[in-house]
Image: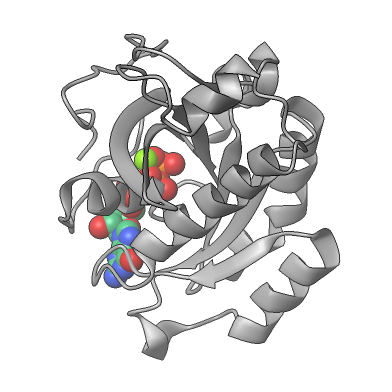
Amino acid sequence: MVEREAFNLKVVGSIPTSGYIIIGDTGVGKSCLLLQFTDNRFQPAHDLTIGVEFGARMLEIDSKQIKLQIWDTAGQESFRSITRSYYRGAAGALLVYDITRRDTFDHLATWLDDARKHSNSNTTIMLIGNKSDLEAKRAVAKEEGETFARDNGLFFIETSAKTASNVEEAFLKTAEDIYEKIQTGIIDITNDSSGIKVGPLQPGIVAMADQQSTSSSCC
Ligand code: GTP
Ligand code: MG
């Protein structure tokens, strides 16, 4: 299959690209995770996202370069209908809660329902308990996150966008699973809705966000 060969970088000049979406309640640290992943920095007083913002970065998997195009969505309820339209193009979804705010954990089932309803059935979903640096304020035990993930067939990791702990791992583990699904034929990358694109990078479809070289003006 030509596209799979291209994914394995057998076609010179083409870059395999995987779409990610980051979802979860407002204030859990989605934009800060993206900023840490794309720019290696943390912004302590960060503005809430309006609509959808965009970031991109290269990752190496199995000695191959893969481009991640990441849509960082607004967690506020009023933006829900805009952000829902981004699920379909995502091969990976990062579902984030804040380990210091139990309400953000309690809302996971609703977020997961939404993700399952609107995304591709093969989308890899990674559950992320963010703000692990705030251990003294912890309101959700790590085991609770692990149990929710196990019960719902998700990957799980705790991160800190502040210290960068496990941020790279969260994106990488998701990409590795997507890569594995392509290798084993679970994801058919000839299907437009797979969230995997092969070929020269497109400008991207960005709502209410500026696309700059590697990340948006979100933080
Ligand atoms: P919306 O855009 O409204 O959906 O929120 P968001 O999920 O993008 O949250 P954002 O990244 O803007 O972070 C909210 C606040 O939490 C900011 O003040 C951040 O500085 C803070 N924050 C984010 N991640 C961490 C973290 O890992 N540790 C600590 N201590 N603070 C964090
Ligand atoms: Mg945000």
Viewer-proximal residue, 72 or 55?
A: 55
Residue at far bottom of view: 136
Q: Is residue 49 visible?
A: yes
Image location of residue 163, percent across then percent down: 24, 72
Residue 56 vertical position relative to residue 167 in the rendered view, above or below: above
Q: Quadrant of the C terminus?
A: top left
Q: Quadrant of residue 181?
A: top right
Ligand 2 found in image quarter: top left
Q: Residue at x 50, y 29 (%)?
A: 7
Residue 101 in view, yes or no: no
**Lateral position of residue 2 relative to residue 18, left or right:** right
Looking at the image, residue 90 lies above or below residue 93 = above
Residue sitting at 78 percent across and 37 percent down? 116
The extreme right residue here reads 151
Query: Which residue is depicted at the point 36% across and 18% down?
Result: 14
Judged left or right of residue 171, residue 89 is right
Where's residue 209, x and y in %? 30, 18
